[in-house]
Image (spheres, grey):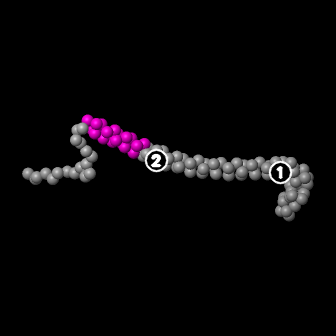
């Protein structure tokens, strides 16, 4: 009897009558729940992947912003120090001024 039911199940599957047979009517709740869980899994995986891509993109933007902040701070501190020193030199009347030419090496005579 069990062998005949097994053959009957296999024949039902091969003939394509699985959804129309009593298997679906007996287990419709389980099949529907399983399909819902699979759909939720796919949706959750897609949401996680898009969130991870957004996090990577924002981390790149953050690194660029941090670098720009450090560069701007350095430029500001350099200008502040330079103007403060220029003001101090002018107030002491030392006669010093900012050079127009950059420093250069003097050629040395060979021995």
Cα distance, mark 1 to mark 2?
Answer: 56 Å
Q: Is residue 80 magenta?
A: yes
Q: Earlier in the sequence, mark 1 or mark 2?
A: 1
Q: Give coordinates of residue 60: x percent, y percent.
A: 52, 49
Is residue 4 in view?
no
Q: Give coordinates of residue 16: x percent, y percent.
A: 85, 62
Q: Residues within 10 Å of mark 2 (few under 14, many from 20)?
A: few
Q: Which mark, residue 31?
A: 1
Q: How many marks?
A: 2
Is residue 88 in view?
yes
Farthest left residue in view: 111
* Quarter assignment of residue 13: bottom right
- Measuring 40% from the left and 43% from the top, which residue is drawn there? 76
- Is residue 39 placed above or below 84 in the rendered structure? below
Element type where label 2 sits in the image:
helix
Farthest bottom residue in view: 15
Q: Give coordinates of residue 27: x percent, y percent.
A: 87, 50
**Comparing marks 1 and 2, which lies closer to the viewer?**
2
- Measuring 27% from the left and 46% from the top, which residue is drawn there? 98
- Is residue 40 placed above or below 21 in the rendered structure? above
Q: Is residue 46 magenta?
A: no
Q: Main secondary structure of the magenta part?
A: helix
- Measuring 90% from the left and 57% from the top, which residue is drawn there? 21
Look at the image and give the residue range highlighted in magenta: 73-92
Q: Give coordinates of residue 3: x percent, y percent.
A: 87, 54
**Residue under numbered circle 2:** 68
- Is residue 2 placed above or below 86 in the rendered structure? below
């Amino acid at each position: 009897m069990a062998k005949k039911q097994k053959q009957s199940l296999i024949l039902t599957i091969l003939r394509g009558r699985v959804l129309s047979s009593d298997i679906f009517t007996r287990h419709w709740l389980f099949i529907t729940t399983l399909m819902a869980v699979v759909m939720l899994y796919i949706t959750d995986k897609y949401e996680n992947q898009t969130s991870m891509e957004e996090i990577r993109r924002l981390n790149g933007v953050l690194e660029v912003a941090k670098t720009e902040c450090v560069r701007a701070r350095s430029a500001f501190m350099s200008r502040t120090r330079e103007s403060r020193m220029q003001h101090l030199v002018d107030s002491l009347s030392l006669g010093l001024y900012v050079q127009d030419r950059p420093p250069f090496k003097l050629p040395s005579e060979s021995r």
